[in-house]
Amino acid sequence: MNYDWLNDDKNALIYVGDAMCSWCHGIAPELDKLKNAHPDLDFKLVMGGLRPYNTEKAIDMADFLKSHWVEIEERTGQPFKHDILKDPDFVYDTEPASRAVVVARIMNPEIEFDFFKAVQVAFYKDNYNTNEVETYLKLAKEFDLDVIKYEELFNSNEAKEHTKADFQVSQQMGIKGFPSMVLKKDGQFTLIANGYQKAEEINKIIAKL
């Protein structure tokens, strides 16, 4: 995976998130506004790794997760469905969803952010199982990706290592929570948002830098 953009001379908005982070789903409309407001800035997406390789089942975290989801839906208007929390077999491992986005990036970087948002909708609104490759094959088809190639990449060590590399970039940037926004300007990296914020508030911070 090419991370040359970390060291080039282009200014950028860097979004560090996780497709299975509920506040990342909540902030999605605000990020669209933020991205559209700054066409002069490169937009980069880094998979932060919320609960990668987790083995805990969602049903055992159901009360905790549902309380967050209800709050986020009320605050942001983003849709949440809770049926997946009743599945006794669903493991809340965020690595597969992150890898799914990384594979889309490898195949077509231009669709990466839209694919990321589509994974969020598939999980939170439609309650698709994010541990099953079929969930992502459906999305790959919708995004006109070669489904056979997508599945091969998704199951490859290459994609797993690329995903792990994203997690490491997040750690190296000192990110402690998601969603986080970092402004790269004149070679300097500044954390401009950690947690949910409205686009207008983030824009005010950018304007001062």
Image (cartoon, helix red, strand yellow):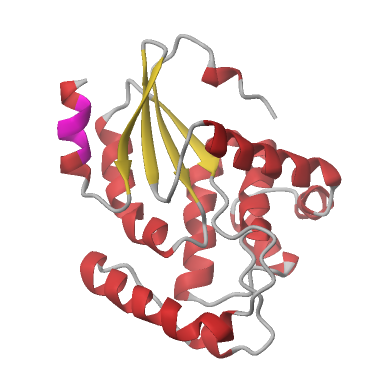
Write the residue at 66% across / 75% down: 91
Please name the predominant secondary structure of the magenta segment in the image. helix
- Residue 165 found in image quarter: top right
Question: Along the line of sight, which residue is nearer the eye, 98 or 52?
Answer: 52
Looking at the rendered structure, the number of numbered marks drawn on it comes to 0
Image quarter where the C terminus lies is top left
Describe residue 93's horizontal placement relative to residue 124 as left or right: right
Describe residue 205's horizontal placement relative to residue 72 as left or right: left
Query: Against 140, is 157 above or below?
Result: above
Q: Is residue 64 magenta?
A: no
Query: Against 108, is 147 above or below?
Result: below
Region of the chain picked out in magenta, as a range: 202-206
Write the residue at 67% across / 51% down: 99
Query: Against 7, is 127 above or below?
Result: below
Query: Against 118, is 127 above or below?
Result: below
Q: Is residue 203 magenta?
A: yes
Describe residue 25's horizontal placement relative to residue 36 as left or right: right
- Residue 73 found in image quarter: bottom left
Q: Does residue 81 show up?
A: no
Image quarter where the N terminus lies is top right
Write the residue at 61% across / 24% down: 3
Question: Along the line of sight, which residue is nearer the eye, 144 or 110?
Answer: 110
Question: Along the line of sight, which residue is nearer the eye, 2 or 71?
Answer: 71
Question: Along the line of sight, which residue is nearer the eye, 206 or 79?
Answer: 206
Q: Does residue 149 show up?
A: yes
Write the residue at 54% across / 60% down: 119
- Residue 78 found in image quarter: bottom left
- The image position of residue 206, as x and y in percent, is 22, 27
- The image position of residue 145, as x and y in percent, is 68, 48
